[in-house]
Amino acid sequence: MRIGRLVRLLVDHATVVMSGTKIASELGTSRSEVWRLIQQLRQLGVDIGGHPATGYSLNAMPDLLLADILGPLVQGTIFKNIHHYYKISSTNSVAMDAAAAGAPEGSVFLAEQQTAGRGRGGNEWHSARSVGIYCSVVLRPPLPPSDALLLSLAAGLAVRAAVQEVDERLIPDLKWPNDLLLGGKKFCGILTEMNAEVTRVRYVVTGIGINVNQANFPADLQSSATSLRLASGTEHSRLQLCGALLKSLDREYRELLENPGARESIVRRFSERSSSVRGAEVRVEDNGGFEGATEGLDSRGFLQVRTAQGLRTVLSGTVRLK
């Protein structure tokens, strides 16, 4: 918490040099602790000028997803409880534990770095420090478990809208059910996990990982992964994008709960923004594995695939483009 308050203090006094004594007094801590926090921020890439003898000042607005800075950007949304971590195992794991312990709807869990980021099907999500958005939100929708897929599709639409808000040159392609692509390469993955009874959802955690400013990837990901920076040639503000994402997700979620026609709208808009839900040759790797051509989404949002044996509905599983 102190490091977030320190950043907020430096932002609020961006035009002046603040002494270590003044900062320590404002934070209720020691000058040596202030020095330690300053060093930690510098290691995270925050451009802070000065030293203990002269005081400190921000040379540039920090691109950290701190609650004190992000909160004002998402006022009016359900996302009022923002938790920020510098390094954790997985935002989804932390969010699921928090939800089980009673965390309110709208709780947000953000990390600068994940050591065990998770994707769909048990895959690992590469989570380099302070270049991506690693975000999980707790939702408690009054919906049946069969509608959980709609939340994933809505999240994909929210990511797409947020990306276009910050850079209209980028036109993400939605890949059913939970990926977004640029130039045929993945830059975003969505992992939705749920705790439910037979007829109602207790809580849902929607995890969203976005590659924002990565300049490169490990060798095994170079052919399949990209980032907004690689696709556009421009670095982007993670803070601005995260704010746009949460506002867009809030709109999609409220619409789903309040508008009886939202289900049809989500399925239709997802289909319109995807190049692969109709007419694409795919292989479904689960359910014994089968191949065919996609024939759109059904009314619930499930993918339909025409095989040699007839039309099959994909309820779950990994779908790969051939």
Image (cartoon, grey):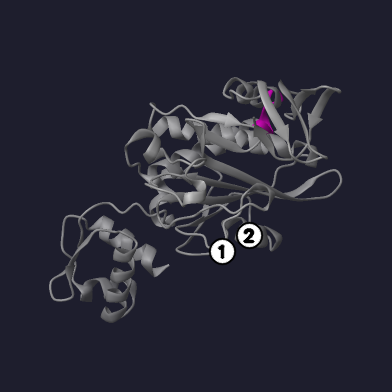
What is the secondary structure assignment of the residue under circle 1? loop
At 49% from the left and 55% from the top, the residue drawn is 127
Q: Which residue is mark 1?
A: 89
**Quarter in which the N terminus is drawn:** bottom left
At 68% from the left and 60% from the top, the residue drawn is 102
Residue 245 sits above or below residue 26 on the image: above
The mark lying in front, picked from 2 and 1, is: 1
Residue 71 located left or right of residue 154: left
Residue 192 located left or right of residue 249: right
Segment tinted magenta in the rendering: 256-261
Confirm or deny contact between disc 2 and disc 1 (CB under 8 A). yes
CA separation in Å, label 2 and label 1: 8 Å
Please name the amino acid that badge 1 sits on.
Ser
**Quarter in which the C terminus is drawn:** top right
What is the crowding at mark 2: few (fewer than 14 residues within 10 Å), some, or many (at least 20)?
some
Q: Which quadrant holds residue 66?
A: bottom left
Q: Which residue is mark 2?
A: 93
Is-magenta flag for residue 149?
A: no
Q: Which quadrant holds residue 41?
A: bottom left
What is the secondary structure assignment of the residue under circle 2? helix
Q: Looking at the picture, how far across and down is residue 179, in whole percent?
A: 59, 37
